[in-house]
Amino acid sequence: MSGHSYDAEKYWKANLRLIFGSLIVWALVSYGFAILLRPMLAGIAVGGTDLGFWFAQQGSILTFIGLIFFYAWRMNKIDEQFGVHEE
Amino acid sequence: MSQFAINLIFVGGSFLLYIGIAIWAKAGSTKDFYVAGGGVHPITNGAAIGADWMSAASFISMAGLIAAGGYSASTFLMGWTGGYVLLAMLLAPYLRKFGKFTVPEFIGDRFYSKNARLVAVICLIVASVTYVIGQMAGAGVAFSRFLEVDSTMGLMIAAVVVFVYAVLGGMKGITYTQVAQYCVLIVAYTIPAVFISMQLTGNPIPGLGLFSTHVDSGMPLLTKLNQVITDLGFNSYTADVDNKLNMVLFTLTLMIGTAGLPHVIIRFFTVPKVADARWSAGWALVFIALLYLTAPAVASMARLNLMTTIYPDGTQSAPIQYDDRPNWVKEWEITGLIKFTDKNGDGRIQLYNDTPAFQDQAEARGWKGNELVVNRDILVLANPEIANLPGWVIGLIAAGGLAAALSTAAGLLLAISSAVSHDLIKGSINPDISEKGELMAARISMAVAIVLATYLGANPPGFAAQVVALAFGIAAASLFPVLMMGIFSKRINNKGAVAGMLTGLAFTLCYIFVYKGWLFIPGTNNLPDNAANWVLGISPLSIGAIGAVINFAVAFLVSNATEEPPVEIQELVESVRYPRGSGQAQDH
């Protein structure tokens, strides 16, 4: 990278923060809502079953898609901000 | 027109399409052969990843697994999709920036160690070869059922087709045939699902139909299904699992295994820019989700359909007469994948869960054991017949199943052949080989890999059924952690990486072998393979995640106890983190 190493460090930190936040959501919907927290969500009915079941079979997949596109969009913006994007 | 002729037209037509694409997309250079020239559009790459990833297991087996397991099988849905989040954020963009052709090449360069590269090559080959056997065997089954040829003969035909487009076109030919195969497989999977969802719930979108009302009973579909199967002694479909630790670890193993599988990672090397690698991970998951959101609907609806076929007047009334069984049952009986034994001699088909808890009820109804055994792999293939769909849908399913098996086989064969020609031959044995020579070596190793895969597909070793455990365990415990550490840490050195990979791998293999038999040789297991004997109830399928943790920990400890990596390696790590200049990186 052509910029200063200070910027480089800030860029990498911004990436790590974004990854960290995204992975919290990733873990929350799959390991959380769909598995470990399912009994707590049992009261919320969804089409003949409960919210945890929906997250296990569909909700987590939909969230994963949203997460990846959000990450790609944010990160491509951050690339531009720090001038490390490709033309 | 006979069903055989229809199937032949669909399958033959799709094969001609793939070969046509292969001739159009012939590879002229090693860059074409390994990374399709590096100019694939992210959406195109997304569709190719979809076909690359969705194998015979996803297309044929997954819905059957979910139908049998209900909620507990959600692991496959989350595990085989959640890995893409990890790929998009932790691996794909940086490996694309690194801009080389293979996964072991990154490991060898980053850890400045031929040994590390060699260990990675071995892990890649073992994971990919075991995986490819399943694809070839799956193609054989589809052929024997739909084209009425001997399954070995079917396998040979499949091998010739793969041979033509993979050897000729390399990654370039594979990329564009995978896009075509994606279209074939998703249409084939979706159409019967839409019809069945319409019949059962009136909702044309199967993913929504799953949570809608069952038209005949007026109850929610899942409530109806739970009622029917619990009446027959089966576990409730939506019931929670007892061992959450095992479910978490199994899901995690599948996720990090997915992210660590080389045939998926190398697909990200084909896009022009780092930003494209991020987008194409998103598109890949969209294309995968079209099938994965439909699969749980297919699973529950097919299970309900099967039950109402056997018990047309409800579970409290008598099941159907064997002589009145529908045509599709007869067809599948021929293949041996449906078996009926009239245990109580009443000429009717009793299908129920033969457990001690259900004993009293069974006796009261004069039942002497479950009489119908249905192989769960036939669920998707038999779906159009169960729902009485027209013959062309069956032809489509045949073409779709073959597309899923062949596209994944081609991706795996490319990963294997590039590891051999690029990492072993150019990387170690003969570094001075010319580009032309390397391209020839790549084609020859591809041809050898196809012959080997075909042979193993026709004569599957006893462990073929265990491939999932092995391939995902290896990828999770060996490849994913070193790849991630290679990018996110500058401190991990060659010794740490090799020690981490070896301990992670050894631990995982040992745990699997203790329960499944050493090298899967029957009878050599030390402990019976059941929940009572597993440590903390962790199944051998779930152990890869623990292996990964061990890999991380050992690599960290060993690296910190030994010297720092050289400055140029730290600069290499720095450079993969910043996107600018990935175009030049690949021109080597």
Image (tube, coloured by chain):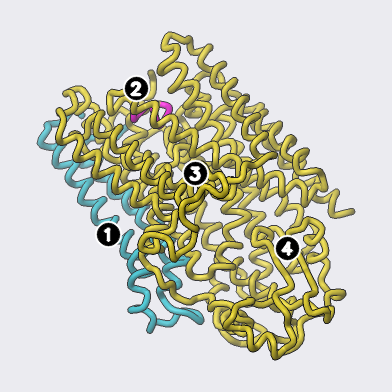
Residue B56 is left or right of residue B95, and the answer is right
Circle count: 4
Q: Give the spatial CA distance, label 4 vs label 2.
A: 52 Å
Q: Nearer the viewer, residue B77 or A87?
A: B77
Q: What chain letter is assigned to the residue under label 4?
A: B
Is residue B135 at all visible to an observer of this figure?
yes
Image coordinates of residue B113 in percent, x first then y, are 30, 23
Q: Is residue A26 above or below residue B220?
A: above
Q: Is residue B103 magenta?
A: yes
**What number is the disc on residue A24?**
1
Residue hosting label 4: B384
Question: Label 3: which residue?
Answer: B518
Using the image, determine if residue B203 lies above or below residue B88: below
Q: CA distance from mark 4 to mark 3?
A: 41 Å
Name the chain under label 1.
A
Q: Provide the secondary structure element on which disc 1 rests.
A: helix
B410 is higher (above) or lower (below) than A49:
above
Say few, some or many: other residues with alpha carbon within 10 Å of mark 1 (under 14 / 14 to 19 / 20 or more). few
Residue at left 71%, top 78%?
Answer: B308
Question: Which amino acid type is marked by label 3?
Answer: Trp
In this view, the mark in front (2 or 1): 2
- Mark 3 or 1: the one toward you: 3
Please name the color used to draw chain A. cyan
Asked if disc 2 and disc 1 are in contact, CB closer than 8 Å, the reply is no
Q: Residue at x 55, y 78 (%)?
A: B222
Q: Amino acid at mark 2?
A: Lys
- Colour used to depict chain B in the structure image: yellow
How packed mark 3 is, by other alpha carbons closer than 10 Å (few <14, some 14-19, many 20 or more), is some
